[in-house]
Amino acid sequence: MKNKIRNVTKNQGVVGSIGALQVENERFTYGKYILKKWNILVQNKGNFRNKIKLK
């Protein structure tokens, strides 16, 4: 179980990074979903949250 939990957190980081790129390129369509699903990830990373400027 510990290994599975670690893998999930790694995947969250990857998804968060992809979400940041998608936010800039596709007008927040994928980014809003990432913000809802990975809310904890966004709150923990101030830089990631500051990059996203919702219009």
Image: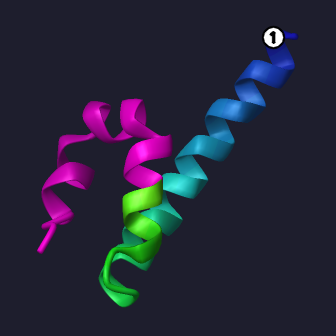
Is 19 positioned to the left or the right of 11 in the image?
left
Front residue of 23/48: it is 23
- Main secondary structure type of the part rendered in magenta: helix
Does dot 1 land on a helix, a strand or a loop? helix
Quarter in which the C terminus is drawn: bottom left
Residue at the extreme bottom: 25
The region drawn magenta spans: 34-55
Instruction: Identify whether 1 is placed above or below 45.
Output: above
| Residue for badge 1 | 2
37 in the magenta segment: yes
Is 44 positioned to the left or the right of 14 in the image?
left
Instruction: Assess disc 1: are there few (<14), some (14-19) or many (≥20) residues with their C-alpha within 10 Å of its C-alpha.
Output: few
How far across and down, in percent of the image, does residue 7 sit?
76, 33
Residue at the image position 47 percent from the left and 61 percent from the top: 17
Instruction: Identify whether 29 is placed above or below 16.
Output: below
Colour scheme in use: rainbow
Instruction: Identify whether 35 is placed above or below 1.
Output: below
Residue at the image position 40 percent from the left and 87 percent from the top: 26
Quarter in which the N terminus is drawn: top right
Q: How many marks?
A: 1
How far across and down, in percent of the image, does residue 2 sit?
81, 11
Instruction: Identify whether 50 is placed above or below 10.
Output: below
Is 52 positioned to the left or the right of 41 in the image?
left
Amino acid type at circle 1 is Lys
- Residue 39, image quadrant: top left
Residue at the image position 18 percent from the left and 42 percent from the top: 46
How far across and down, in percent of the image, does residue 37 sit?
50, 43
6 in the magenta segment: no
Is 47 positioned to the left or the right of 23 in the image?
left
